[in-house]
Image: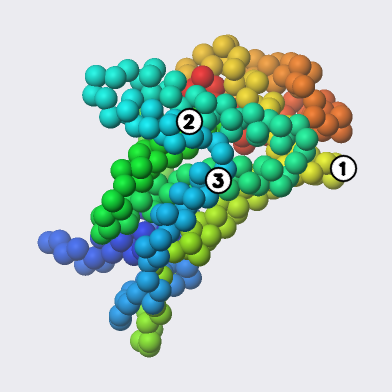
Amino acid sequence: MYVDKQLSGIAAVQTLSRLNRRADGKKNTYVLDFVNDPAQILAAFQDYYEDARIETDSDPDLVAKQMTKLDAANIYTPAEVNRVWAAWSDRNGKRGALTSALVPAVERFTNRWSRAVYDDDAAARDELDKFRSLLDQYTKSYAFFSQILNFGDTYYLKLSVFADLLARLLREQLDGGERETVTADDVVLTHYRLEKQRDEDLQLEDGEARGLQGMTEAGMTRQQERERAAKAELVEKVNRFLGGLDASDEHKVSAVELLVREAAENKDLQQQARNNTRVDFSHSPQVRLVLEDSVWNQNRQSEAIAKRFQELPPTDLVELAMAFDLWERSRAG
């Protein structure tokens, strides 16, 4: 078995424990892990080694608390939630009706987002980011608690559907949608080499097991911390090329987002992205030309950033845009 994605907590235990199943002729188990730190995998298993008990009960009021916060953001109205539910639950309905019902909320959010970016208002952007995270958190919380609780009000279910659809649409609008799954259907293996770098013998220890945490607001906060870590990684990518400028990280990230978004709307790039691999696409002369045009056409939020864009070598400009998923967005355009 090989592992090429981050595993932690119960996901690590469930995934790797499948290797312990019995099979005729099976003597040893090998895991090729290209991503995870062995110490973190060991820590995940240690929680479940001897005993697993819930130390902190799940908060049954969590869903109601999250609903209150979502409503207080004034991004949508209860009437809009009901319209989305009606369109979503109509078996004979058309997708256009569902999208139209979501448009008012999407426009309110994107207008506030654009205003926050224009004003370089970090606090406003942080609040909007929290709202997006809360949409996903509410959907997960409701899915969990609805299996054991009767909320007595269908609005909880309607808001769960609304929150899931709105979160997806905002990802498409602001992030360029979900990353497309990469397939290797057209790859032909001609040579390979096995090279042992290291092996690990992870030994679980006897002792008192640590308690498990139920679903609470604090647990949701840890999810937000993971999201912040992902954003920090994105900022690090930007600062490889734009570091040292007298501009905020949020401003620099927004400038790159605007650049990539404009370039990804180019029809020629969209065609090339659909017909080429990511590597071939990144070496296309057309990509460089479109990015350079986008730099000059962009409504500049910062003269310093715009000037640095113009000074970047074409290869660096392409690498920066590829880090922001230019190929993926062009394929989806």
Point out the residue furthest to the left here.
24
Residue located 46% across and 27% down the image: 102
Residue located 59% across and 17% down the image: 265
Q: Which residue is disc 2 drawn over? A: 169
**Earlier sequence position, callout 2 versus callout 3:** 3
Q: Is residue 241 above or below residue 46?
A: above
Q: Residues within 10 Å of mark 2 (few under 14, many from 20)?
A: some
Q: Front-most of 198 and 167?
A: 167
Cα–Cα span, label 3 and label 1: 35 Å
The three-letter amino acid code for the residue at tag 2 is Leu
**Earlier sequence position, callout 3 versus callout 1:** 3
- Confirm or deny contact between disc 2 and disc 3 (CB under 8 A): no
Q: Which residue is disc 1 drawn over? A: 246
Q: Front-most of 13 and 168?
A: 168
Q: Is residue 327 left or right of residue 86?
A: right
Residue 226 in the image: state x and y as whole percent. Answer: 54, 55
The three-letter amino acid code for the residue at tag 1 is Asp
